[in-house]
Amino acid sequence: MTCTSKEQKPVSGELAGIVDLALCEPDLVRALRKAAEAACAVYGVPKIYFAQALGKRLHYLTGYGEETYLPAVKEPLDGGIWVFFEGGESLTAEQKTRLVTALKQIVAAYTRPNDSCGASVTAINKESPGGKL
């Protein structure tokens, strides 16, 4: 099953498989790592990684691939999360757009509250049993 919103078209083909694989993971970080691993394999991109904006800085979350020391191209996802492609010159503009759309769907599935697809961000940052930290 692939999660979609009204603003995003459902993905198909190998991208649907990437989304489905990622949505089987228990939290967003693991889902993004699984998506990066699958996308690297499908598209031959040497390295894909993710960062979250906290203030003015981007903080590494997870990723997959070999260090290339090539300049990374970054694309915004949702919720202050960015994806970086190192050595992504092999991606066409259409492939990159479709991959970013699929990654946005994964992020949205884990960040929307009370959604049937994926977990919510509150699953990553659980409150203590008393309800307060």
Image (tube, rainbow, N blue to C red):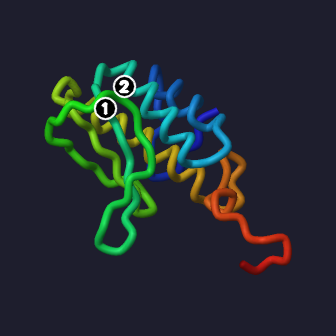
Label 1 neighbour load within 10 Å: few <14, some 14-19, many 20+: many
Between 77 and 7, the residue placed more toward the observer is 77
Q: Tags 2 and 1 in contact by the CB under 8 Å rule?
A: yes
The C terminus - image quarter:
bottom right
Q: Amino acid at mark 2?
A: Cys
Q: Does 41 sit above or below residue 5?
A: above
Percent of width and height locating residue 126: 71, 64
Q: Does 1 sit above or below residue 61?
A: above
Q: Residue at x 71, y 59 (%)?
A: 114
Side of 24 relative to 93 (left or right): right
Q: Which of the 4 image quadrants contains residue 42?
A: top left
Q: Does 65 sit above or below residue 114?
A: above
The N terminus - image quarter:
top right
Q: Residue at x 64, y 57 (%)?
A: 124
Which residue corresponds to mark 1? Answer: 47
Percent of width and height locating residue 36: 42, 33
Q: Marks 2/1: CA distance?
A: 7 Å
Percent of width and height locating residue 106: 52, 44
The disc at residue 40 is: 2
Label 2 neighbour load within 10 Å: few <14, some 14-19, many 20+: some
Q: Amino acid at mark 1?
A: Lys
- Disc tally is 2
- Assign a secondary structure to mark 2: helix
Percent of width and height locating residue 65: 35, 29
Side of 28 relative to 117 (left or right): left
